[in-house]
Structure formats: structure tokens, C-alpha cells
């Protein structure tokens, strides 16, 4: 599997992209007539795959739609898809019949046999949630014209986990929050998030740790509100507060702790430019500091796009893809350091 | 070593706070319920399923007594749901409605009814589900009575109705998956 582009959501166009990297809208749907994935046997899971493949590929959902049978794919390909946020870690690591359909431009992906039969998502740069909502709705309507989804008048779309029931929708944004991290405010955000019914997760979503101060923030309410209400509240009421919180924290650092800030940023540049062994987590953390430095105009002469791309390229599967071979952990650290040195040198 | 108990009751503590002030160490250990009462949130990094099962376990003293119910659609029990955090099929929502309602209400900020999108053909879909239920029953009977020709006809009709009903067949749970669970 080869991806030539860096990922369409990796763009710094638009407002607030200093804080919001990318956004996503995801719908959870189950095909009526089958047990949920966790309770289905492999024959039923294969049948779900067959139906999904037939429906998804016969609809004109997007240009260059392709199908990946994950049970037949090598681990490196699965990890590559995960690093590009096209499949979840759960789907990458599961051991039963499962697949993903991906559009040629990688903005749409439909996971099959994740926790729910279908998990369809659209990804975009920055904070363009409204467009994504419109797009996913079209995809949902198209698929729904061919399949009956498990639905009840009371509960709405029925999902394996009752926390997703109703609209089955998850709106999420990938936020870069180094200001809140450096000022120690991130724990307060996490606590406040609970009251706002938000989930704050790591870089790869559920069950993952934050890497490089990137956090995935998403809604947790899916019942009792229309999709539009949920969108408006998330986009217009919640996100601006978090963005402002982060920007305020950054400003505090500049005003009150500029020396520490410059030290962290320039130390990061120094290590990235001179290290000969670099772990993925360390690389992400240092690149995160550099990204902060560029946005705060404390660093000059380093291209932001290059840093954004490196954030993807230093990850294990991407690194191995660019080298064209499977590497052991030591070789990876060496290759990663070389890649970064050359890019930032 | 056993995990510390809650400072206020005998439940295991799930929230721990250690503070050092002027060299004096203070420890606070709280169970789920008392942590919530104290306004201390759960660690948000836990997978949602785990949070959910903890929710259920800590709030389901009443539900435990009823946990012998088994979902006719998939054979799921409430006890098993408590462990995994995931339901077995759409019928589970109806089977365990009583147990699930307070849980969903809590997780969904008090909401108990869907107000979002409705499938464009939800109405016809319900009729179709009833028909599928009937056909699946007849198919079971035909296969049981070794009436293979009739079984093949029924299978064709099912396939026409919904690709989901073709080939391996949905099994018993096909019947009322999408039936309204309002009662």
C-alpha cells in the first residue's frame, strides 16, 4: 500500500489551525438483521463484509473508492491506515473478518466490523465541521437507500455500545494543546471536559495516549438532540472556548515565561537537528514544540508544512514505507533521526 | 496489595489523590459514587467501554436481581453486557430496556428519546422487518421439514427484500432487530 500525499487533513489553511489540526465526523450504523459485531460469528461477519462491499462499491460515493480487506493485509499496511486516521486502532489490531473502504482523496473512510457494522467518517483540515456533516449525511443517505439500519423510534440508531445510541454521531477535532500542557492546565481541561460531556483522547482516539500534545476532543452526547444542535453546540460554544484557553495559555507563556518557552522550543530544534537516534514519541513531542515555536513566531526559517508532514512521516509505518523495508526498533530510531535531520538541517 | 478502600465507605477506591504540602502528605481515596459526589471526575483517558461498565456495575444493584434475563435475539445476558460494555444485537435494547434506561439517561445527560435523523424509509422499513420476521420463521420451518424447494423460494424472497437476509442468513435475531423498542 502506498500513499503519495501527506493526508488532506494535514493543512494549515483556515482559521484557528494553530490549535485545531483536523476534524472528523463519524456515524455508527448497524445493518438490521445481524447481531452486533462483538456477538456475531465469523460467518456472519464475513456476510456483513460481503454486503457492505457490494453496497459501498456500487454506490458512487467518492472518486477512486478502494476496498482493503484488513484480515488479508500485512500489519504494516494496517498501521499505515491507522497512522493516517483512516481506521481505528481497534480495527487495525482485531483478528476477525473486517475491512475498510477509503476514498481516493482519503477524506472518506467506511470501517466495516469495527465495534459497529459500519463506522463511516469524513475527515477534513481545520475546523470545517459543517461541510463534513453535510458530506457524511449524503453518504449515510446513499447507503441507507440500499440497506436497512437497526433503528428504533425511541432510541434512534442502535449501536453496540449504548453510549453511541441515538444519532450515533461523533464530532471530533484533533487539537494541538502545547500551551495547556506546558502551563499544566491540561488536567483542568480534562476535568472540565467531563462536565461539558466531551471526551478528551489521545492521538489515535479511544484508548491511546496523547503524543506530542495532540488531543482528540469529541462530543459524548448522541441522544435527545438533533445532529444539527450537537454540531452547533460543539462548534460554536465548546470549541471556541478550548481554542481560546489554549491561545491564552500560549500568551501567558510568552508574557511571563518567555525564557523557558524559548529554551523548550530551541532545545527541541537542537535535538531534532542533531540526534542520531529518535523514538517516535520523542520525535512527536519535539516536533510539537517546534510547531508551537513557529506559530508563536519564536522560530523562523522552518517551514510549518514540513513540520506537519514530519509529524506523520516519523510514525512507524510511514517511516518504514519511506524506507521500503521493515526495520527493527533500533534501525527505526536511526532512520527516523536521519529523516528528521535531513528535513530540518 | 489490595487496592485502598474509599474514605467514606467500603467500596474500592477509584480516585486517588496525594498532595504534599509543607512536607505533610495527605491522601484521598474515593469510590466511584463518592468521587462523583465530591465533583472529582474519573480519569478521562479510560476507554469509554470501561467507564460504561464501571457505571453499570456501580449502579446496578437493582439490575443485578434482574440479570437472569437473556436476549432472545442473541442470547446476551445483562451480566455479560456489564463485563464487556457492548450489547449483542438490536433486540438487546428491548430486552434490557428497564436496566439500560437509567444508564443511558445518565450517560446522555438525561435524554431518553431520539430526536435526530430518522431513516428516510423508517416506516416501510418497519413493515419490511415484520415481513422478514415472518419469512425467516417460515424458512426455519421449511428447512426443519426438509422442504428444500420451498426453502429456496423463501430464501429468494428474503434476498429480494434485503441483501442482509441473503446467504448465511441473519439467524433468529433477524426478526425484530429494527422493530420499535418503545413499550
Image (cartoon, coloured by chain):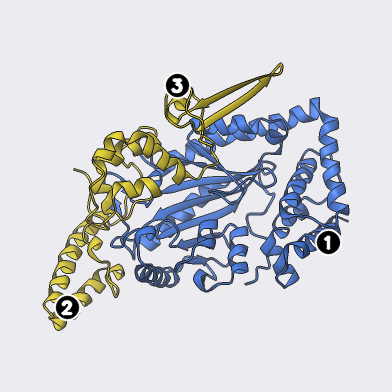
Chain colours: A blue, B yellow
Residue at the spot 34% in from the left edge and 66% down from the top edge: A146
- Quarter holding the C terminus of chain A is bottom right
N-term-proximal mark, 3 vs 2: 3
Q: Relative to residue A321, is residue A177 depicted above or below? A: above
Q: Kindly report which numbered mark, 1 or 3, lies closer to the viewer in this rendering.
A: 3
Locate residue A132 relative to residue B160 in the image: left or right. right
- Marker disc for residue B122: none
Q: Position of residue B65 (x, y in %)?
A: 24, 39
Question: Relative to A49, is A152 on the left or the right?
Answer: left
Residue that mark 2 sits on: B151
Name the residue located 40 percent from the left edge and 37 percent from the top edge.
B55
Letter of the chain that mark 2 sits on in the rendering? B
Residue B16, placed above or below residue A29? above
User: How far is the residue under mark 2 from the one under mark 1?
Assistant: 65 Å
Residue A289 in picture, x, y percent from top left = 77, 43
Task: Decide which of A311, A36 is in the foreground and name it.
Answer: A36
Chain to which the residue tagged by mark 1 belongs: A
Out of B160 and A190, give the one closest to the viewer.
A190
Q: Which residue is mark 3?
A: B8
Q: Residue furthest front?
A: B1
Front residue of this view, candidates A87 and B55: B55
**Direction top: furthest residue:** B22
Distance between mark 1 and mark 3 Cα atoms: 55 Å
Q: Position of residue B99 (x, y in %)?
A: 28, 40
Amino acid at each position: 500500500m502506498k500513499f503519495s500525499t501527506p493526508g488532506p487533513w494535514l493543512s494549515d489553511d483556515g482559521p484557528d489551525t494553530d490549535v485545531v489540526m483536523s476534524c472528523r465526523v463519524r456515524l455508527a450504523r448497524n445493518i438490521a438483521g445481524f447481531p452486533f459485531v462483538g456477538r456475531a460469528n465469523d460467518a456472519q461477519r464475513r456476510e456483513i463484509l460481503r454486503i457492505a462491499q457490494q453496497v459501498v462499491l456500487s454506490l458512487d460515493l467518492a472518486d477512486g473508492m478502494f476496498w482493503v480487506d484488513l484480515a488479508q493485509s500485512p500489519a504494516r499496511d494496517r498501521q499505515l491506515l491507522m497512522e493516517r486516521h483512516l481506521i481505528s486502532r481497534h480495527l487495525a489490531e482485531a483478528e476477525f473478518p473486517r475491512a475498510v473502504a477509503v476514498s481516493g482523496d482519503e477524506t472518506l473512510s467506511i470501517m466495516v466490523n469495527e465495534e459497529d457494522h459500519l463506522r463511516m467518517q469524513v475527515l477534513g483540515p481545520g475546523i470545517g465541521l459543517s461541510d463534513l456533516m453535510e458530506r457524511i449525511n449524503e453518504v449515510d443517505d446513499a447507503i441507507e437507500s440500499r440497506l436497512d439500519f437497526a433503528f428504533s423510534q425511541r432510541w434512534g440508531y442502535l449501536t453496540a455500545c449504548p453510549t453511541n445510541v441515538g444519532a450515533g454521531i461523533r464530532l471530533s477535532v484533533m487539537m494541538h494543546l502545547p500551551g495547556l500542557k506546558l502551563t499544566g492546565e491540561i488536567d483542568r481541561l480534562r476535568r472540565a471536559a467531563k462536565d461539558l460531556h466531551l471526551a478528551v483522547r489521545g492521538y489515535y482516539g479511544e484508548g491511546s495516549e496523547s503524543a506530542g500534545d495532540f488531543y482528540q476532543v469529541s462530543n459524548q452526547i448522541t441522544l435527545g438532540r438533533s445532529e444539527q444542535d450537537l454540531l452547533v453546540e460543539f462548534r460554536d460554544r465548546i470549541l471556541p472556548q478550548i481554542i481560546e484557553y489554549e491561545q491564552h495559555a500560549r500568551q501567558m507563556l510568552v508574557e511571563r515565561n518567555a525564557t523557558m518557552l524559548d529554551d523548550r522550543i530551541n532545545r527541541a530544534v537542537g535535538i531534532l537537528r542533531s540526534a542520531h537516534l529518535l523514538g517516535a514519541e520523542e520525535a512527536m513531542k519535539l516536533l510539537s514544540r517546534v510547531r508551537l515555536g513557529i506559530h508563536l513566531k519564536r522560530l523562523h526559517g522552518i517551514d510549518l508544512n514540513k513540520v506537519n508532514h514530519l509529524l506523520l512521516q516519523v510514525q512507524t509505518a510511514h517511516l518504514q514505507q519511506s524506507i521500503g523495508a521493515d526495520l527493527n526498533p533500533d534501525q527505526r530510531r536511526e532512520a527516523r533521526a536521519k529523516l528528521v535531520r535531513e528535513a530540518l538541517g | 496489595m489490595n487496592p485502598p478502600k474509599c474514605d467514606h465507605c467500603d467500596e474500592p477506591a477509584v480516585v486517588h489523590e496525594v498532595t504534599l504540602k509543607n512536607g505533610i502528605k495527605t491522601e484521598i481515596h474515593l469510590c466511584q459514587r463518592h468521587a462523583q459526589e465530591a465533583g472529582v471526575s474519573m480519569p478521562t483517558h479510560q476507554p469509554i467501554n470501561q467507564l460504561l461498565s464501571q457505571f453499570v456495575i456501580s449502579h446496578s444493584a437493582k439490575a443485578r436481581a434482574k440479570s437472569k434475563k437473556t436476549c432472545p435475539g442473541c442470547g446476551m445476558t445483562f451480566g455479560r453486557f456489564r463485563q464487556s460494555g457492548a450489547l449483542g444485537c438490536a433486540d438487546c435494547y428491548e430486552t434490557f430496556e428497564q436496566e439500560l434506561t437509567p444508564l443511558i439517561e445518565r450517560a446522555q445527560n438525561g435524554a431518553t428519546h431520539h430526536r435526530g435523523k430518522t431513516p428516510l424509509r423508517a416506516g416501510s422499513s418497519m413493515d419490511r422487518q415484520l415481513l422478514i420476521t415472518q419469512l425467516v420463521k417460515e424458512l426455519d420451518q421449511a428447512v426443519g421439514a426438509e422442504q428444500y424447494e420451498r426453502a429456496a423460494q423463501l430464501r429468494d424472497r428474503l434476498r429480494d427484500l434485503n441483501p442482509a437476509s441473503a446467504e448465511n442468513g441473519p439467524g433468529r435475531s433477524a426478526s425484530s432487530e429494527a422493530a420499535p423498542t418503545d413499550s
